[in-house]
Image: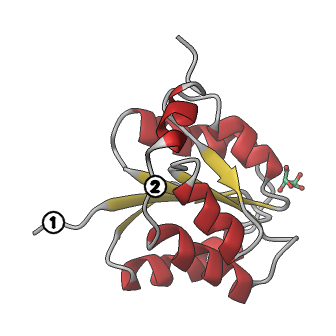
Amino acid sequence: MSREIVAIAADHGGYEMKELLKADLDGLGFDVLDLGTNNADSVDYPDFGHAIGEAIANSQARYGVAICGSGIGISIAANRHANVRAALCHDGLTAKLSRQHNNANVLALGARIIGIETARDAVSAFFTTDFEGGRHERRVDKIELP
Ligand code: RB5
């Protein structure tokens, strides 16, 4: 059976964390679609937020992980794309809630805000937690513009 695809992208601020988290995603049973950046040279975070957003919007990947220095810029860019719900999470709890209540499909992380072990907790929580549906479904449906 083919494995589900998770797209991952980062700017230079998140490059190192991206490289480390790819092994975690593999361990959780996903194929990883790495959309760059591919080294620590300075780049522009919107390019990578849009790459993640497009991969989700085009159904190239079901989920994404987006990393920049703060997690803010890359999540803003990803969220410009249809059907993308990128959640900037700071730990396992926020990652878990972003799945349970918001049906987030992109986990955004700030590599200059949290350390790698906290990022690992967030990845693990995000990818092992289901959307609760029910009243949350109505609210999530209201997010998308007509
Ligand atoms: C890059 O210096 C930094 O601005 C970027 O990684 C991110 O924090 C933007 O939101």
Q: Position of residue 91 (x, y in %)?
A: 73, 74
Relative depth, front residue between 82 and 45: 82
Q: Please tell me how many numbered marks the rendered image carries.
A: 2
- Residue that appears at 72% across and 83% down: 118
* Residue linked to disc 1: 2
Q: Position of residue 78 (x, y in %)?
A: 63, 39
* Residue linked to disc 2: 132
Name above or below for residue 41 compared with residue 78: below
- Could you classify mark 2 by the number of other residues whose Cα lies within 10 Å: few (under 14), some (14-19), or many (20 or more)? some
Give the residue type at disc 2: Glu
Quadrant location, the N terminus: bottom left
Q: Position of residue 29 (x, y in %)?
A: 32, 77
Q: Which mark is residue 72?
A: none
Relative depth, front residue between 121 and 131: 131
Report if residue 44 is visible in the image: no
Where residue 110 sits, quadrant-wise, is bottom right
**CA separation, marks 1 and 2?**
25 Å
- Residue that appears at 76% across and 62% down: 12
Relative depth, front residue between 77 and 11: 77
